[in-house]
Each structure stands twice: as C-alpha cells, then as structure tokens.
Image (tube, rainbow, N blue to C red):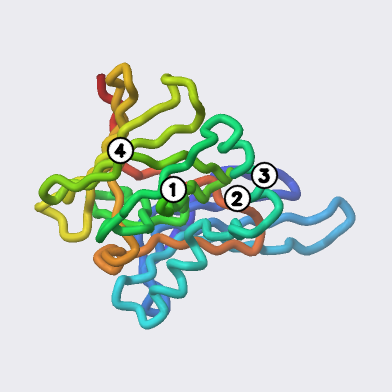
Amino acid sequence: MAFPLVYGDTNFRIYQLEIPFTENDTTFLYREYSFYRCDTCTTFKKEVSSYYIVPRNHPEFRKHLRQTMDFFWEEDSVFSKLMMDELTDYVPTLIHNNLGDMPRYWYQVVKYDGQYYLSADFSAVIALRDSVEAFYGMELGFAALSNVSRQGDTYSYEIHTSSEKSSWFVKQYTPVKEVKGLWRCTVTSLDNERIILYVTNDEEANNFDLIEWKSTDHDLAGLSRYEEIGLPEK
C-alpha cells in the first residue's frame, strides 16, 4: 500500500494515508509514518501514528470506552471542589432533583464516512448528579441542575452556570427512532438560540463502534472526514 509523502526535507519526512485498510484483523482509518534524524545521524528514526476501530462486539470494548472518554477528573479532587465552590458562589442554592430513570452519562456521537461512531476525537462526557450537570472534558465544569422532567421519550432539564439570566439553558434529550441508541440533544438559551448535538448514553454505547487512536510520536489532530451533524439553529 502506497503512503503519499506530505512533507519532506533532508532530515524529516511525513507520509499519510486516510483510507480504510485492514491489518491483523483491525480496521485502520488513518496511518502516518514520520521519519527523522539529527544532523549528525546516518539513519532515520521511524514513528507510527494510527486511527483504528474498536468494534462494539470487541471483548474489551467497555475497557477501551472507559479509557477513551474523559473521566480523569476525580470528584473529590481539590480542583473539583474549587469548581463546585465557584458554582455555588453564583448559584448558592442547589436543588436536589429526582432524576428517575434518566441516563446519568452521555457521550457525543459523530458521523464519519456515513457511519455513526463514538470517537476519541470527541471524548467529553456529560455526567448528571441530582443537583449538578458535570462536564468532563479538556476543562472541568459544573452547572446547577433544575426542573428535571420527562415527557414521553424526551428528558428535559435546565442548567444554570451563574445567576445571570443569559447563562440559563434548557437541554432536551430525544431518541432518534431510525438509529438505535442515538439521541438528539437540543440546547436552547433563553433568547431561543439552539445548538444540536447527537449523543448516546452509557447504557446504549454498545450500539456504536469506537474510533480510537495510538501514536509513538505525538497527539493526533483529528480525522478529516467527520460530517457535521449538529448545527446551530435560531
């Protein structure tokens, strides 16, 4: 298989391919080879970076999912306590809501080359507690949770990131009937601006394959063939 050269000079070369191929029973979506040597070296050092699929029926799918999604913030850490203290400075009274059967963990679902996936490139997690919504991503965030309700198949609640009216939002989770395990998440501000995301919950995550990555060299910047399936709306 030919890997096109995308950059090259005397001491540094990068070859990339973003076309699915199978190797040792694993489907790869992307492969990158980088070769470099120091000015006084006679040989190149080789590094390999790849995106690959962990199928939903893989015996260690749940282990990969847990490692991929951003659960690294400990709830009892000093930083978590600081974030909660900051929230209660703005929203001093947190309401204890009855979440009922509402799923507690939500992961973003993406579309790549016409298929729905969970992906290491979109690894943030929304976790619900009875009084707060926690965002586990590059930054940890908490929002006050209130007015939890269910109407038919749709779960709704409000989140407040501060006492300012402009920081209040309504979130609704509605199942997409055509795709098992897929939910449409609508985030609406008080001035009726809406953002649409597609998500799944922890209980239904096994309906989607996982796009994972590994590299001996550097963090990967993300695949190029994701389709935009969540759009801002007015």
Q: Residues within 10 Å of mark 2 (few under 14, many from 20)?
A: some
- Where residue 54 appears, as percent x and y from the top left, is 38, 70
- The residue identified by callout 4 is 171
Which of these two is toward me, 53 or 179? 179
- The residue identified by callout 1 is 131
- Where residue 221 appears, as percent x and y from the top left, is 54, 45
- The residue identified by callout 3 is 82
Q: Nearer the viewer, mark 4 or mark 1?
A: 1
- The residue identified by callout 2 is 14
Q: Is residue 140 left or right of residue 124?
A: right
Which kind of residue does numbered mark 4 sit on? Lys
Q: Quadrant of the N terminus?
A: bottom left
Q: Is residue 188 above or below residue 48?
A: above
Q: Are marks 2 and 4 in contact (CB under 8 Å)?
A: no
Q: Secondary structure at mark 3?
A: helix
Which kind of residue does numbered mark 3 sit on? Leu
Q: Residues within 10 Å of mark 4 (few under 14, many from 20)?
A: some
Q: Secondary structure at mark 2?
A: strand
**Sequence-wise, which precedes: disc 1 or disc 2?**
2
Q: Is residue 36 left or right of residue 19?
A: right
Which of these two is toward me, 84 or 17? 84
- Real-space Cα distance between discs 2 and 3? 43 Å
Q: Is residue 219 left or right of residue 163?
A: right
- Real-space Cα distance between discs 1 and 3? 16 Å
Q: Is residue 228 visible?
A: no
Marking on residue 65: none
Q: Residues within 10 Å of mark 3 (few under 14, many from 20)?
A: few
- Real-space Cα distance between discs 2 and 4? 43 Å
